[in-house]
Amino acid sequence: MGENVVKLFWEYIHNADFDSLNELISDDASIWLPNTKEVFKGKRKYIEFNKKYPDRWYVDLEKLYVCGETVISVAKIFNSENTASFYVTSFFKVNNNLIEEIVEYWGDNGEPPKWRLHEKLSERY
């Protein structure tokens, strides 16, 4: 069941339907962003953060894993012009069909360092 909650979460984010997140997130949820050392205490602040975030963003949900009460997702997030994109690995704690906690790790989606390509240590795909 937690898997369906997380799929719906990403669908709402993709559609910028942030008010609908109210039905998925518990009132006192904590959403952690370790990359920026932030925590959003309560769904109201997290939803407001999403509403105010600059630009329009879309989601390609690439992977979803269920591990007990934890659902792990990997998603590519990209802007409306497709000029910027990121990968986010998210750990959702779901209880009674409500998200109680999210921990999100964000990473840039960009070019590899030239030295690795030059030394043929990696290949572009």
Image (cartoon, rainbow, N blue to C red):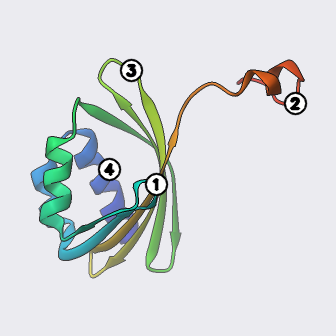
Is 108 drawn above or below residue 18 in the view shown?
above
Whether label 2 touches label 1, CB < 8 Å: no
* Residue under label 2: 121
Left or right: 5 in relation to 22:
right
Residue 81 lies in quadrant: top left
Q: CA distance from mark 4 to mark 2?
A: 35 Å
Q: CA distance from mark 3 to mark 1?
A: 23 Å
Return the x and y of residue 86 as percentages of the image width and height: 46, 37
* Mark 1 residue type: Asn
Return the x and y of residue 54 as percentages of the image width and height: 21, 33
Q: Nearer the viewer, residue 86 or 67?
A: 86
Q: Secondary structure at mark 3?
A: loop
Whether label 1 touches label 4, CB < 8 Å: no
Q: Decide which of tag 4 and tag 3 comes sooner along the chain.
A: 4
User: Residue at horizontal 87%, vertical 30%?
Assistant: 121
Q: Decide which of tag 2 and tag 1 comes sooner along the chain.
A: 1
Q: Decide which of tag 3 and tag 2 comes sooner along the chain.
A: 3
* Residue under label 3: 82
Q: Decide which of tag 4 and tag 2 comes sooner along the chain.
A: 4
Return the x and y of residue 107 as percentages of the image width and height: 52, 43
Q: How many marks?
A: 4
Return the x and y of residue 88 as percentages of the image width and height: 46, 48
* Mark 4 residue type: Trp
